[in-house]
Amino acid sequence: MTDPPRRIRFPGMTISSLGKKTALLLGWTAALLFSVSLNLVVLYAFLPPPVTPLMLRRAREGVRKIEYRWVPLSRISPYMVRAARAAEDKHFWEHQGFDLEAMRMAWEHNRALAGGPARGGSTITQQTCKNLFLWPDRSYLRKSLELYFTLLVETVWTKRRIMEVYLNVVETGDGIFGVEAASLRYYRKHARDLALEEAAMIAVILPNPRRLDPLKPGEELLRRYWRLCRILREEEIPAHK
């Protein structure tokens, strides 16, 4: 006759007390993570971020020089603000961080063209949170954190601040971040002096800035560029609210 299995006992600790301590530890960890993330969001509501996770990743990948120059929104051409909004998030000033219609259209497009180039439905707020706080991959964990930071940023920041941070930290070339650095690299001028056509070209390379070259645009890039120029000339797209 075999002996009954022995119960594992922890000195001075029952299963019930172990569960309570685990729950307490998880609660304290969640509170700490919330506190750190909230402090970061509040801090970057006023101060320029010195670096982003994507900049550090590009440096680890061997990019020799990271070009990043922060400028306030008042020193960025209104054409650039309008072009970014028209190309990346046309309902930016109206939504609260998520554009459900754009997400639905992206899902239908990707389902219809399975295996082809995917279309994203992320808003400028979502992209800003991904660029500033997170790492670039498509995991469920990263997307969940992006959702959390998007809600937090939309609550704490103004829309103007979101646009300002986005235009300063978005990747605009190989080792190039922000529209000021892109303007100096591609057009040898400051972002405040960008013409409509120059702003449009920077905007259309944002989906894949390391592959697309605004100085040597291919046929598809030129089609998107002319389409965006036409939209900017014909439609009244506000730069700010």
Image: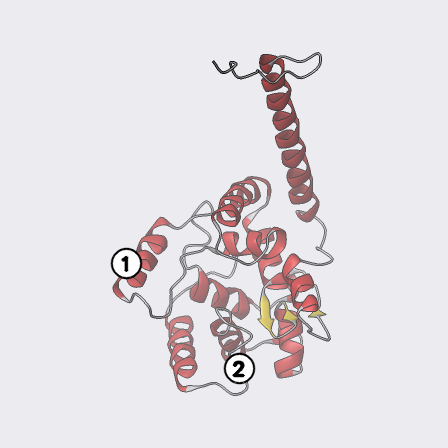
Q: At 50% from the left edge and 74% from the top edge, which residue is drawn?
A: 205
Question: Where is residue 148 drawn, in percent x and y?
Answer: 53, 41
Determine which residue is flagged by label 1. 108
- Indicate the amino acid at tag 2: Pro
> Tag 2: Cα neighbours inside 10 Å, few (<14), some, or many (≥20)?
many
Vertical relation: 209 (above or below) 27: below
Tag of residue 34: none
Position of residue 112 in the picture relative to residue 47 (left or right): left
Quadrant of the rendered image containing residue 165: bottom right
Neighbor class of circle 1 (other Cα within 10 Å; few <14, some 14-19, many 20+) is few
**Residue 200 percent location from the top left of the image:** 49, 75
Q: CA distance from mark 2 to mark 1?
A: 29 Å
Task: Relative to 141, say whether 225 is above or below.
Answer: below
The residue to which callout 2 is attached is: 214
Q: Which amino acid, mark 1?
A: Glu
Q: Is residue 194 visible?
A: yes
Percent across and percent down for residue 49 are 70, 55
232 vs 50, left or right, is left
Q: Between residues 19 and 171, which one lies in front from this camera angle? A: 19
Seen at 64% across and 38% down, the residue is 38
Q: Who is closer to the viewer here, 205 or 236?
A: 205
- Closer to the N terminus: mark 2 or mark 1? 1
Nearest to the observer: residue 114 or residue 31: 114
